[in-house]
Structure formats: C-alpha cells, structure tokens
Image: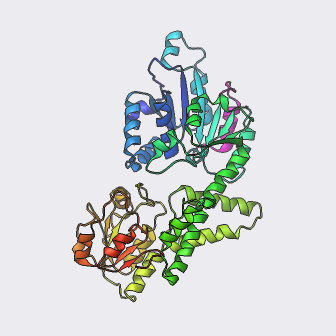
Amino acid sequence: MSSESAVNNDHTLNDKSSEVCVIIGHSIEAITSAVVLASLDHQVHIYADLDLLVQQVEQYGFERHLQALWQLYGQQQQIVQCALPASADELIQSYEGKVGQSLDEQKATPLSVSCYWLFLESIKSVWTDDNWVMAFNHSQQQTTPVIMSGIEKLGHITKLADSLQRAWVYYVPFVFLQDGEAYSSMLKPSLWLLGEKTPESSHQLTVLQPLLQYARAYHHADIATIEFARSSIMAMLATRVSFMNELSRLADSQQVDIGQVSRIMGLDARVGSSYLQAGWGFGGHTLPTELDKLQQSSQDNSVNMPLLQSVLHINDDQKELIFRKFWQHYDGFIDNKTVMIWGGSYKSGSGRTTGSAIHPLLALLWSYNIKTLVYSDKAKSSLAKDYGQQPLLQLLDSPYEQLAYAQAIFIISLSPQHQLDIAQLNQFAMPIFDAQNALSRPQINALVGAYTGIGRAK
C-alpha cells in the first residue's frame, strides 16, 4: 500500500464488512493483533505513526510468516494503515460522523466499530491519557468495547479504565507473545489473561472469542488483579533466570555442570523446567520494561523490594561475565586480538538486539582494540544499523567465514537449528567462550581447544 493511500484515511473496504476493528499503535503486539484479527476474517484499521510502523515491520523481518501475512492483508485491504491523527477526537469522529451519509457512502465505509484496541506505549508520545480518555467519553457509541494493552506501573491501567465512562473496558497483557513466533503464539496463546472493568463481561468481546477458546490456559479477573498478575509473572521469570545465573558461579567453583543441575531441577514438578537455563541473562523489551515499571511501583508505594534489586544487579553483571572469563583465560593479555562472535540477538530466533549481551561485550572488546568478526543471521541488519561505522567490527555471512583469522570464539545466541561443525572448530583448536551454554556435553568433550561456559567446566 502506498503512503498516500494510507494517509488519507478514506477507510476503503471490500463489500463483505460492515464492522471494523480499530487498532491504535505501531508495536509488534499491535501489528500481530492486526494480522491475527485479519486471519480471523475481521476488517482492521491500524492507526500509527506510519514511519514507525514501517520501521517496526522491517525490524521484524525475521518473523517471515507474520511479515508475509501483513503484506498480503494490506494488498487485499483487509488491513488498512492509517496515519494517527493529532487527537483522539479526530479519530473517533471519522467513524461516528458517518451517520448522515447516503446509502452508497455507507456501503463504502463501515458504520460501526466492533472494538477499539489501544496499545498504550505506542500512543503516549502523541495522545495524553486525558486527551484520549475525554475523547472516548464524548463518543456517541458507548457500547463499543475498548481494549487496552501495554506495560505500565501497577494500577495505572485500572485508573484509565475507571476514567472511561463505559462498561465494556478490558485489559489484555501480552504475556504469551514469543519473539520469533509472534503470530502462532497469539493465535494459540499459552496463557490468555483478560482484565474486565465489568465482571463476567468477556462475552461482549466477540472479536476475541476464538483466541479465548484456543488458549491453553485462560483467566479473567478485575483489571487491577490482571495488572498485578502480569507483573508478577514477568518478575518471577526474571528471578528464575538470575537465580540460576547466580548458582552457575558457585557451580564453577565446585566443578559441577549447571546444565545437568537445571535438568534435574526441572524433573521436580514443584519447580518445572522453564527459565532454568544459565547464560548471560535476559534482555529484550518486555522483561526489562516490566521490572522497571515494578520498581517504580514499589518506590511510589514506599515498599522496599531487595529481591528485585538483586535480580536486576545479577542480570547486569552477568552480561560482562563471559568477557571476564576471556580476560582470565589470557591472563589479561588480550590487546589487539581478533575474535569471532556467533549471534547478537537477545534470544535465539529473534532479530532484535535490545538488551543483548553483545552490546557490553563489543564495548569491552573494542576498548582493548580487539577486532570483532560477527556472524548473526537474524540480527545482522540491527547490528549494522547500530555499529556500521565501527572499524573494529566486521559482519559475516557465514559462521565459519574467516575463522582462521580469529584467536577465540564467543557464543551469544546460537540458533538451535545451527549444526556445529566440530571438525572445523578442531582444525584451529581455539578457545570457545559460550555465554549461552549452547554446546552439548558430547560436543564439549569432542573439542580439542579449551571450552568455557557459564557454570560448566570442561
């Protein structure tokens, strides 16, 4: 779709739809929601800063299925991209102003909105809370459901819901979305949480009923409870990661493989196996943002949370641990070396580098004038954008390209689909510093060169 057709907001539709789902935001959650609703045969209008929307779609090029569907539904006018107006009033009136239209005009444009879905982090730079809440309160269609999504301080979304003078207000946190599998994880969510302003009113959300039915687990409650549950889930996951990383340091001192310990712990049903893998920590957008908002909430309410502080401290420190192991291996004589780095994204399967350990690693290596050869298929464009002018960085198209020129290998986020060629590695017998604990025990045992992981002695 051309920018011109997107900006003029003429709401051109095919003839089959008399209702439209209005999505407001440019985040990956907003884009995924638009694609999923279109897949469920709904007409979707998505309002956003169009430049940011294009950037977001491009940034998530590694989500090939999602990107293909986004382009297809755009071409079919199932998803219509619209420029976000300066005020919420203008957006709402673009629909409600159609009451006096002729029959022919009504056929070309929808008369009703099935839901408004606001992604709060995307709109806050354009609309203030007071602005859009007042606009919705002045709306003539008070029975149209309003859905909110986003990560905010505890209680903030509840206050917004209370300010809206309508009954059908809901909160959907994206605790189920998996980077790299956004479309499938939303179409069949692992856990769907729904906050309701009016108790037992989920039946009013007809557009979301299939997703509620497909969810492996589903729970609805008042919005304040769902907000707290969202934050608690994310904080628990972060805590598990940091706890295992703390244990990995003790495992190093005891010559114990933390990977085996993790598997044993996972056998206990009281513990479970999720988020028990030691490594360089966690990154991305969701977990760090969630912990930041939780920290703000605790400060606002004068509640001391030392465990949360420890989780954040361990995670920050863990991202530099693999460099310290590298420094110790060479007794500090690391200046002017050349190293290979595999992976750059904050997790396997993603193309995003937000919060990834590669950033502090690169900064530390470059401070010693170390040349870095980086292979990261999904995150290559992101790294090129961030560090394209750095003379000590070279981005590669193959993990084994120029291996002969490197004196060490770092592993940050190797894809599980990547088949390591141990024979090639053994030709050079260089030390491997595995911040992800990506290598299996048989692979480690087969190496000729030194291996250093996180809580894993060779």
Report whether residue 84 is seen: yes
In this view, 379 is above or below 43 = below
Report whether residue 83 is seen: no
Along the line of sight, the residue nearer the viewer: 17 or 442: 442
Residue 374 is left or right of residue 6, and the answer is left
Q: Residue at x 31, y 82 (%)?
A: 336
Q: Residue furthest top?
A: 103
In this view, 50 is above or below 382 = above
Residue 410 is left or right of residue 16, and the answer is left
Q: Quadrant of the N terminus?
A: top left
Q: How is the image coloured?
A: rainbow
Q: Quadrant of the C terminus?
A: bottom left
The percent position of residue 410, horizontal first and vertical second, equals 36, 72
Q: How many marks?
A: 0
Along the line of sight, the residue nearer the viewer: 33 or 217: 217
Indicate the quadrant where residue 436 lies: bottom left
The percent position of residue 447, horizontal first and vertical second, equals 31, 76
The percent position of residue 339, horizontal first and vertical second, equals 31, 75
In this view, 254 is above or below 404 = below
Q: Residue at x 72, y 63 (%)?
A: 299
Q: Residue furthest right?
A: 302
Along the line of sight, the residue nearer the viewer: 388 or 207: 207
Residue stretch in magenta? 126-144
131 drawn magenta: yes
In this view, 446 is above or below 149 = below
The percent position of residue 115, horizontal first and vertical second, equals 60, 30
276 drawn magenta: no
